[in-house]
Amino acid sequence: AYLGAAIRANEFLVYLQPKIDIQNECVCGAEALIRWNYKHRELLAPFRFIPYFEADGSIVKIDELVLHRVCAKLKEWKDNGQSLYPISVNLSRKHLEQPQIVSRLTGIVDSYGVDHGLIEFELTESTMAENQRYLIFVMNELRKRGFRISMDDFGTGYSSFALLNEMPLDTLKIDKSFVDMILEENDANKILIILRHIISMAREMGVNCVAEGTEEYKQVLALRELGCEIAQGYYYSKPIPVKEFEEKYLK
């Protein structure tokens, strides 16, 4: 019940974290992330409320709220003749299991007249632990409609490689835990071998790689050398309010 009141009181904010093309250091997209301005008194990070909303199923409302806000912004940028970048929006497993999910999501995007290619739906690898056949079907249906599909946290689950074969992916997000290891002297060589293989495999499959949690220049250098296209992380920018994103990155 409180979620509805919080939505009506406009307590949820959407922040954007830029994705940077590390070959030429330009912005090439962003991920939309939710923050809760609790009773307009305290800004809560997602880990403090998302698990509760996932548990009771109301996460679906949060997912849709973010999608609405992102589409409204893309429409506004388009109407103002500003640069448009694909924005990724997270989809929780509860959401994917909703009946008519594909037509619901398509309906939201179409109500703003936004080009489907500007919306990337991001799923975490753990989402795929159950109902794989059904979820792959949903992803294929979204992809047929021109939406982009991204797999978050790649490499943290046991099923990664088996799934790659079947999933219709545009983007693979390399989990922060791998990117962190680039900085560890003792494991650095091994991790570079693993990353090189993930990145070259993705490229051969026609899939982009985004390195998450890139925080230091040394990581950017290593990733660039390994042929990773895109980085997202504090080295470039933390998630920022939409207004700040517009001022910094939109022409």
Image: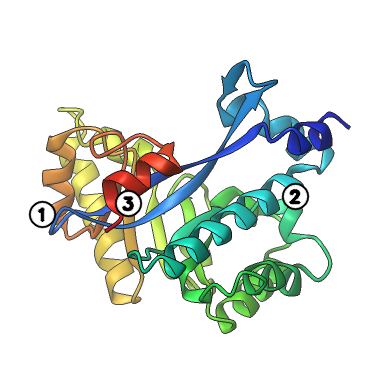
Residue 47 position within the rendered picture, expressed as x and y whole percent measured from the top left: 59, 28
- Residue located at (55% from left, 26% from top): 45
- Residue located at (24% from left, 39% from top): 236
**SS of the residue at dot 3?**
strand
**SS of the residue at dot 2?**
helix
Q: What amino acid is found at the position of numbered circle 1 in the picture?
A: Glu
Residue 182 position within the rendered picture, expressed as x and y whole percent measured from the top left: 21, 37
Q: Callout 1 environment at 10 Å: few (<14), some (14 to 19), or many (20+)?
A: few
- Is 91 situated left or right of 130 in this image? left
Q: What amino acid is found at the position of numbered circle 2 in the picture?
A: Val
Q: Which residue is mark 2?
A: 60
Q: Earlier in the sequence, mark 3 or mark 2?
A: 3
Q: Callout 2 environment at 10 Å: few (<14), some (14 to 19), or many (20+)?
A: some
Q: Which residue is mark 3?
A: 19
The tag on residue 225 is: 1
Q: Quarter of the image containing the N terminus?
A: top right
Q: Earlier in the sequence, mark 1 or mark 3?
A: 3
Residues at marks 2 and 1, CA–CA distance in whole angstroms: 39 Å
Residue 159 visible in the picture: no
Q: Quadrant of residue 106?
A: bottom right
Residue at far front of view: 80
